[in-house]
Amino acid sequence: MNHFEVRGGELHCESVPLSRIADEVGTPVYVYSRATFERHYTVFRDALVQAGVVAPLVAYAVKANSNVSVLRILGDLGAGADTVSEGEIRRALAAGIPGERIVFSGVGKTRSEIAFALKAGVSEINVESEPELKLVAAVAEELQLRAPIVFRVNPDVAAGGHAKIATGKAENKFGVSFAEAARLYVNASNHPHLNPLGVACHIGSQITDLAPFEAAFRKMRGLAESLRAEGLTVERLDLGGGLGVPYFNQPDPPAPAAYAAMVAKVVEGLPDIRLAFEPGRVIAANAGVLLASVIHLHERPEGRKFLVLDAAMNDLIRPAMYDSFHDIRPVRETDADPVPLDVVGPVCETGDTFTRERLLPPMGPGDRVAFMSAGAYGAAMASEYNSRPLVPEVLVDGDRFAIIRKRPTYEEMLADEVPGEWR
Ligand code: LLP
């Protein structure tokens, strides 16, 4: 459930008409619903607790939507943060999320990022390879600390809405094999500057079926048990993120309650284990829309109609990158019969096409549309391609709204570019 709905013929975010935001802030602009973020986080966490999972660490995947105001909403509800760079750790800390709720993931953490994470007192560094283990050990020794580590294991399970977002197969770059995990765990346990806490997995994103999760989680439980059987301490099981959301061309994903019940069943009877989760999309996607205006309707002689918007692939790259489907809704409802429209942006690439032959009411200059389910991997993946200033973000709370990332001016966009000294 989300808080974007039509009232009086006009699409609203909570109690604010989207047209008001478009008038006052301009377009393109991302618009987020605070109540929806809160609801999605709460539903996910409560489902786990109700299924019997004790004190889960729900570490929201910052990459999905990393605006500090969004992180603060979730952090205030008790969420942790799953991070993949020093920048994301800094964002989480800036939002008031304490180090003990921060997970540091990623296949290529640098020496200085590891040092930063250790000094910030992160809850776990998810180690993805043997060279990385050595680097973490070396940095921890330099700092005279004991690094809390968790081994990210690649469970070799296929899952995910698109090949570019599947991560859990052996051919992907993520994590160590089960055999490596067992060997490295022993090494780490004997190292004075490493504190191995457990194992982690993350098999992919936009997963709409419980079966691959269950297969992977069963393997993870088996690994935890076999490590324990060797006398090793395993107190944490990080089960990653990946739960999908409804997109209109895909099967409906399982509800958080079904996911939680499956998790509880898999870990039943495994004593003294703390579970961690890294959900991103399921919390953020339907909490945001990208609001855009029509520049014009361009009708080619052979009959194809192009609705040219002021939003482009640099603002929302998902359709170009993953062929993803975003529902496009006119901000003002009309009774006009829908016509097939190709919805495109102004960027000079054919790939800057949001959709082809989508049935939409006829629209003209100044009309507004909203791309639904754009709260995750939308603004976070935006760029300045074609020298278009980064898209701003607005947060709605009931009947008020605030700009939580402003639209840069052209001067600001150019300010960091300096001529070389030799010029
Ligand atoms: N944990 C790790 C280690 C991850 O790599 C990811 C996502 C997550 C958690 C969160 O997954 P989620 O719950 O959001 O599915 N840009 C793509 C999605 C890439 C996901 C990458 N990793 C998209 O727009 O669909």
Image (cartoon, rainbow, N blue to C red):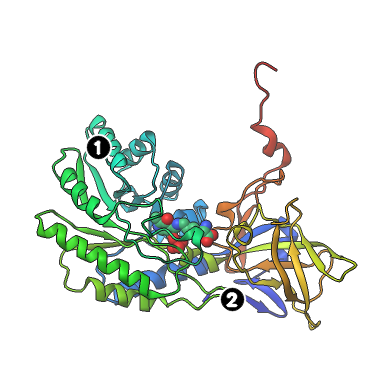
1 or 187: which is nearer to us? 187
Residue at numbered disc 2: 248
309 above or below 143?
below
Specify the amino acid type for callout 1.
Answer: Ala
Residue 120, quarter of picture:
top left
x then y, percent, for residue 32: 58, 63
x then y, percent, for residue 124: 29, 49
2 above or below 230?
below
Which of the numbered marks, if any, corresponds to residue 317?
Answer: none
Q: Secondary structure at mark 2?
A: loop
Q: Secondary structure at mark 1?
A: helix
402 or 220: which is nearer to us? 220
In screen coordinates, is 286 left or right of 77? right
- Specify whether residue 52 is in view: no
Marks 1 and 2, the one that precedes in the sequence: 1
* Mark 1 neighbour class, 10 Å CA radius: few under 14, some 14 to 19, many 20 or more: many
Specify the amino acid type for callout 2.
Answer: Phe
Residue 278, quarter of picture:
bottom left
Q: Residue at x 24, y 50 (%)?
A: 180
In screen coordinates, is 317 left or right of 145? right
218 above or below 318?
below
In screen coordinates, is 199 left or right of 95? left
Which of the numbered marks, if any, corresponds to residue 137?
Answer: 1
Q: CA distance from mark 1 to mark 2?
A: 46 Å
Query: Which quarter of the rendered picture does the C terminus lie within?
Result: top right
x then y, percent, for residue 122: 31, 46
- Seen as rendered, the residue at the extreme top is 422
x then y, percent, for residue 210: 38, 75
